[in-house]
Image: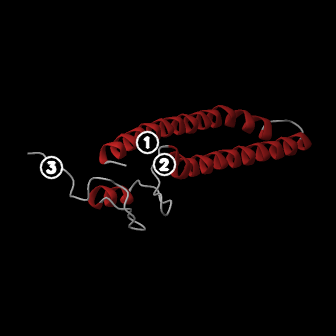
Amino acid sequence: MTRDEFNNRFRAYKRQWLRIETDGLIVVALFTLAAFLLFPHLVHLCFEEPHRQERERFAALASATLGATLAAFGALMLVLVWWCRRCTPRSFGLLCPSCGAPLTGTNRKALLNTGECGRCHGRILDDGGGPPPRAL
């Protein structure tokens, strides 16, 4: 791979990452909005019902609903983080062919400086073996 190919792939990767961050922010905002809209109704059902048995039933239902919602949100965030760190670099060809390390972050800096993977030091960039080109 040449430097230009790598830079084009990395720019496409960063655009995808921006879309993922935007979608994640929308999901967090929707969960927060839903919590603010549903919380007063749950409080009303749990504490303002006239019968104690119904109040206990609604409290259990509210606790179960809240727990399930938090578990679903946590699972969604874990899947999103895993997908962003592993699958996205792979889909753009930004993994080292020798060791499989993602060529993002500190490995990207090492790759652009030396043409080698930051982890296994395998040669990745085919620039004729010389230093990176400089402007005159």
Q: Amino acid at mark 3?
A: Arg
Query: Crowdedness of circle 3 by 10 Å Cα count: few (<14), some, many (20+)?
Result: few
Q: CA–CA distance between discs 1 and 2?
A: 7 Å
Nearest the camera: 24 or 136? Answer: 136
Q: Amino acid at mark 2?
A: Pro
Q: CA–CA distance between discs 3 and 1?
A: 25 Å
Q: Residue at x 49, y 63 (%)?
A: 99
In contact (CB < 8 Å): disc 1 and disc 2: yes
Measured as percent of width and height from the top left, residue 73 is found at: 65, 45
According to the picture, the residue beneath numbered tag 2 turns out to be 89
Measured as percent of width and height from the top left, residue 46 is found at: 79, 40
Q: Amino acid at mark 1?
A: Tyr
Above or below, 132 against 7 in this view is: below
Q: Residue at x 61, y 51 (%)?
A: 78
Q: Residue furthest left?
A: 136
Above or below, 45 against 6 in this view is: above
According to the picture, the residue beneath numbered tag 1 turns out to be 13
Q: Residue furthest bottom?
A: 120
Secondary structure beneath label 1: helix
Secondary structure beneath label 2: helix
Q: Earlier in the sequence, mark 3 or mark 1?
A: 1
Q: Residue at x 36, y 60 (%)?
A: 106
Nearest the camera: 49 or 74? Answer: 74
Above or below, 95 against 36 in this view is: below
Q: Quadrant of the C terminus?
A: top left
Secondary structure beneath label 3: loop
Label of residue 34 in the image: none
Measured as percent of width and height from the top left, residue 80 is found at: 58, 46
Label of residue 134 in the image: 3
Nearest the camera: 75 or 87? Answer: 87
Query: Crowdedness of circle 1 by 10 Å Cα count: few (<14), some, many (20+)?
Result: many
